[in-house]
Image: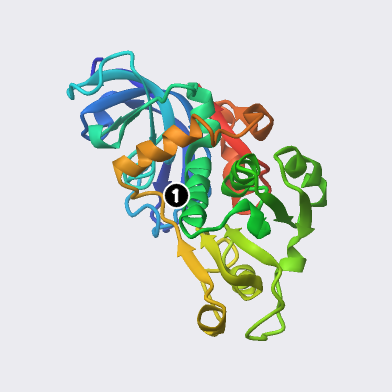
């Protein structure tokens, strides 16, 4: 691959007045960061963090110009690491990809070999991105529930923010593993979609969110998967059965957790945080092995909307507003 080879990529730029612009630009392979593996992208998934980067959030991306995209799957175009050869199908999610290292919303990415995972048997390149960080994070959350002895026979498990990338994948994975799953959403029109993923029923997000300020509430759930944070997470922790667990990974509602310790010390409730970006490679491979096998959601194609790279721009705003159902995947 010649270093002057040109390709298309979304580039976000910081302007003199500290506002940000983004446009589809021509770049050269020589402009990519250093790394042992050059990948020609086949698919890239859109995530909430990508939209933050694309709108100039310095908590996600410190330096601009920048190309977002924390998920990518594709074919190795060059490799100086003997673990990978030209033509290998691979995927990359998390680490610094799309944050401060140019990411998947360009036709080529170059990354350290230590970030790259060979595409597991049982997965196609597009399936890997339909799942992407959403399914990877959801699987980490489900794994933590299982490690804390949450079993299907224990009762109902609720998933908040259920129409989003992580939430919808959590519904699908939990239901496939035999759990009774209730999907929490504010979108009445999404109920049939969520039931098609395996949800036993849907509950309005207002039923989860309690603003009474009471330190404890009547128990309802064996466990919870929370993707939104804020008062929703607070309320969920107050309604989980004794010795139950809640996994959390998001803050779209709020990063604040304002509550007493009573659910933790009187009911023994567990709050289990998940950070998928820095997951160690051994665990990454374990999770992707599960996602290509027994944990692989059914009917993945019903969960995705494919878009062309040049048509991606409107979706940054939509995902920030919670207007995305399932997964948006760029198809190169």
Whole-percent x, y for residue 9 in the image: 42, 30
Q: Please tell me which residue is depicted at 61% across the width and 49% down the height of the picture.
A: 167
Is the image coloured rainbow, by chain, by secondary structure, or in one colour? rainbow
Residue at 73%, 55% in the rendered image: 185
Q: Position of residue 121 (x, y in %)?
A: 43, 21
Q: Is residue 32 visible?
A: yes
- SS assignment at label 1: helix
Q: Residues within 10 Å of mark 1 (few under 14, many from 20)?
A: many
Residue 151: name its quadrant.
bottom right
- Please state, as top left, top right, bottom left or bottom right, where the N terminus lies in the image: top left
Is residue 4 visible in the rendered image? The answer is: no
Which residue occupies the foreground of this view, 85 or 216? 216
**Is residue 294 positioned above or below 253 on the image?**
above
Q: Nearer the viewer, residue 216 or 102?
A: 216
146 and 308: which one is in front?
Answer: 146
Q: How many marks?
A: 1
- Furthest residue toward front: 153
Percent coordinates x, y for residue 258 in the rendering = 55, 80
Left or right, residue 74 beside residue 159: left
Residue 175 falls left or right of residue 28? right
Residue picked out by circle 1: 53
Residue 191 x, y percent position in the rendering: 79, 47
Which quadrant of the view contains residue 298? top right
């Amino acid at each position: 691959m010649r270093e002057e080879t040109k390709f298309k990529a979304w580039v976000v730029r910081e302007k003199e007045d500290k506002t940000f612009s983004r446009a589809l630009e021509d770049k050269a392979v020589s402009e990519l960061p250093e790394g042992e593996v050059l990948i020609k992208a086949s698919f890239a998934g859109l995530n909430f963090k990508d939209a933050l980067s694309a709108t100039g959030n310095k908590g996600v991306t410190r330096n601009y110009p920048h190309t977002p995209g924390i998920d990518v799957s594709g074919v190795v175009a060059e490799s100086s690491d003997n673990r990978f050869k030209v033509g290998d199908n691979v995927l990359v999610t998390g680490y610094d990809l799309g944050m401060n290292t140019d990411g998947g919303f360009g036709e080529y990415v170059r990354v350290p070999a230590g970030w790259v995972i060979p595409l597991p048997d049982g997965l196609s390149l597009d399936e890997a991105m339909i799942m992407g960080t959403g399914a990877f994070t959801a699987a980490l959350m489900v794994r933590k529930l299982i490690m804390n002895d949450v079993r299907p026979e224990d009762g109902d498990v609720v998933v908040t923010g259920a129409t989003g990338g992580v939430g919808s994948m959590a519904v699908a994975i939990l239901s496939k593993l035999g759990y009774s799953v209730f999907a929490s959403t504010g979108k009445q029109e999404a109920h049939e979609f969520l039931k098609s993923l395996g949800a036993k029923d849907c509950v309005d997000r207002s039923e989860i969110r309690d603003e009474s300020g009471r330190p404890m509430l009547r128990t309802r759930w064996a466990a919870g998967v929370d993707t939104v944070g804020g008062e929703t997470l607070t309320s969920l922790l107050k309604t989980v059965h004794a010795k139950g667990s809640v996994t959390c990974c998001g803050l779209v509602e709020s990063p604040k957790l304002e509550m007493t310790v009573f659910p933790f010390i009187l009911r023994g409730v567990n709050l289990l945080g998940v950070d998928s970006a820095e997951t160690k490679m051994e665990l990454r491979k374990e999770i992707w092995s599960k996602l290509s096998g027994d944990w692989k959601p059914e009917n993945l194609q019903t969960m995705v909307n494919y878009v062309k790279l040049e048509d991606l721009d409107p979706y940054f705003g939509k995902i920030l507003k919670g207007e995305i159902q399932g997964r948006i995947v760029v198809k190169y």
